[in-house]
């Protein structure tokens, strides 16, 4: 009985993973509005038309799960980077933690690049809210990063700070997207992160800070 249960659980996990990968790939290629649930099922090799609804409830549920899956992976790297600090972090250190893990993921393989392109689609949705996503998905590394981010910019007007941080995030994701679709040779993950960090500092109005 246990082996049968384990087998079902493994098959369910495999189906879930296949659907997430298919959604990432298709949405990266065609855009969120152009991808149907049927296409996702076909791309994932699923004949059971109810598989997506069973595992995620809806297309939006699949989107949330996809963000959660990859972001959790990236969050582990963010925690490692924060824990490795031996001195008080600078604004550049914090921005590095927010950007470099994303760039590293995209540099690894096509799936990582697809995630960046997928994320570009997600941030254009009317209900997208990064800070809410941090809470919803229990992203410890990103939450710690943003707490430090806020502290280092505590001298700014809170409303202006939040507005500028949101713009910096959007610009960062779009910059990574352009980098992902470039033909080789192109900048390394470290180099493109430096570009994003510099742009973010300009948006935040803190170019003179380290």
Image: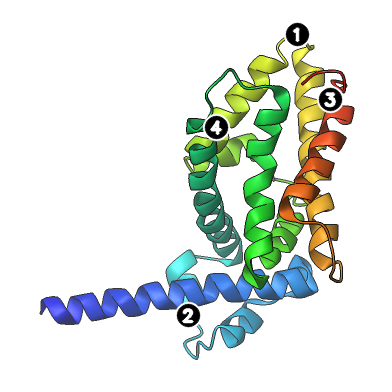
The crowding category of the residue bearing disc 3, from other C-alpha atoms within 10 Å (few below 14, some 14 to 19, many at least 20), is many
**Identity of the residue furthest to the top in this view:** 155
| Alpha-carbon span between mark 3 and mark 1 | 12 Å
| Percent x, y of residue 177 | 80, 58
Residue corresponding to mark 3: 204
Q: Are marks 2 and 3 in contact (CB under 8 Å)?
A: no
Residue that appears at 57% across and 37% down:
142
In percent of width and height, residue 27 lies at 71, 70
In the rendered view, would you say 204 is above or below 4? above
Q: Secondary structure at mark 2?
A: loop
User: Which of the two discs, 4 and 2, labels the residue nearer the N terminus?
Assistant: 2
Q: Which mark is residue 155?
A: 1
Residue at 70% of width from left, 56% of height from top? Answer: 119
Which quadrant is the N terminus positioned in? bottom left
Residue 4 can be seen, yes or no: yes
Q: Helix, strand, or loop for circle 3? A: helix
Q: Looking at the image, tell me whether mark 2 or mark 1 is earlier in sequence order.
A: 2
Q: Is residue 139 visible?
A: no
Element under disc 1: loop
**Side of 192 where 148 appears, left or right:** left
Q: Dot 4 corresponds to which residue?
A: 143
Q: Give me the residue at 55% from left, 83% from top.
A: 44
User: Which quarter of the rendering shows the C terminus?
Assistant: top right
Examine the image and state in which quarter residue 162 appears.
top right
Relative side of 11 to 18, left or right: left
Relative image position of residue 156 (x, y in whole percent): 78, 12
Question: In 3D space, how far apart are the residues under numbered discs 1 and 4 (Cα atoms)?
Answer: 20 Å
- Give the residue pinned by disc 2: 50
Instruction: Quote the CA–CA distance across marks 4 and 2.
Output: 35 Å
Per the model, the C-alpha gap separating discs 2 and 3 is 46 Å
Q: Residues within 10 Å of mark 4 (few under 14, many from 20)?
A: some
């Amino acid at each position: 009985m246990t082996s049968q249960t384990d087998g079902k659980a493994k098959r369910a996990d495999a189906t879930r993973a296949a659907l997430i990968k298919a959604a990432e790939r298709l949405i990266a290629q065609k855009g969120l509005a152009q991808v149907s649930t049927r296409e996702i099922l076909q791309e994932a090799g699923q004949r059971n038309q109810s598989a997506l609804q069973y595992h995620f409830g809806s297309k939006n549920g699949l989107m949330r799960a996809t963000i959660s899956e990859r972001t959790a992976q990236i969050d582990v790297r963010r925690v490692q980077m924060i824990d490795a600090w031996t001195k008080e972090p600078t604004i550049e250190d914090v921005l590095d933690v927010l950007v470099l893990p994303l760039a590293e993921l995209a540099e690894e393989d096509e799936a990582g690049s697809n995630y960046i392109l997928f994320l570009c689609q997600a941030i254009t949705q009317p209900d997208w809210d990064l800070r809410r996503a941090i809470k919803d998905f229990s992203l410890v590394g990103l939450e710690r990063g943003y707490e430090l981010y806020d502290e280092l910019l505590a001298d700014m007007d809170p409303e202006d700070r939040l507005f500028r941080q949101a713009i910096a995030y959007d610009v960062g994701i779009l910059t990574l997207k352009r980098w992902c679709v470039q033909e080789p040779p192109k900048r390394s993950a470290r180099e493109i992160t430096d570009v994003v960090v510099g742009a973010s500092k300009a948006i935040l109005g803190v170019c003179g800070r380290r």
